[in-house]
């Protein structure tokens, strides 16, 4: 994973950008953050994709 940070960042960005906050086959469709408490809400999509876009430009 550390050998290919660009691939990890790109896949993460795709997953966040494609999140519809729904569920697929009983599993969460969106990445969640353990830092957000028991609500386990997905991260803010526009901010997360902007950060990942910037990271991908610099990799």
Image (spheres, rainbow, N blue to C red):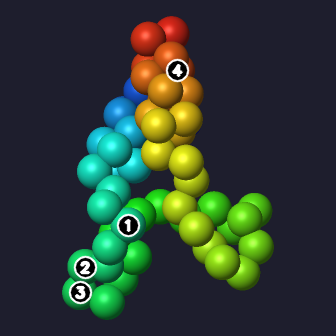
Between the C-alphas of marks 2 and 4, the distance is 28 Å
| Residue at (72, 65) in percent of width and height | 36
**Residue 54: x %, y % from top left:** 50, 17
Marks 2 and 3 close (CB-CB < 8 Å) = yes
Rendered image quadrant of residue 30:
bottom left
Examine the rendering and report whether any part of residue 39 can be seen: yes
**Residue 49: x %, y % from top left:** 45, 34
Task: For mark 2, give the secondary structure.
Answer: strand
Could you tell which of marks 1 and 4 lies nearer the N-terminus?
Answer: 1
| Residue at (34, 51) in percent of width and height | 15
Between the C-alphas of marks 1 and 2, the distance is 10 Å
Which residue is farthest bottom? 26
Q: Which residue is mark 3?
A: 25
Q: Which residue is mark 4?
A: 55
| Residue at (35, 82) in percent of width and height | 27
The numbered mark at residue 21 is 1
Relative to 19, is 36 above or below?
below
Between the C-alphas of marks 1 and 4, the distance is 24 Å
Q: Which residue is mark 2?
A: 24
Between the C-alphas of marks 4 and 3, the distance is 31 Å
Task: For mark 4, give the secondary structure.
Answer: helix
Nearest to the eye among marks 1 and 4: give it: 1
Callout 3 crowding tier (Cα within 10 Å): few <14, some 14–19, many ≥20: few
Callout 1 crowding tier (Cα within 10 Å): few <14, some 14–19, many ≥20: few
Q: Give left or right: position of 33 versus 9.
A: right
Which residue is farthest left? 25
Could you tell which of marks 4 and 3 lies nearer the N-terminus?
Answer: 3
Q: Give left or right: position of 29 versus 55.
A: left
> Who is closer to the viewer here, 58 or 17?
17
Nearest to the eye among marks 1 and 2: give it: 1
């Amino acid at each position: 994973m550390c050998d290919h940070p660009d691939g990890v960042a790109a896949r993460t960005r795709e997953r966040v950008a494609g999140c519809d906050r729904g569920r697929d086959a009983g599993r969460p469709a969106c990445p969640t953050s353990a830092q957000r408490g028991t609500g386990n809400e997905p991260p803010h999509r526009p901010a997360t994709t902007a950060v990942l876009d910037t990271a991908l430009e610099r990799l």
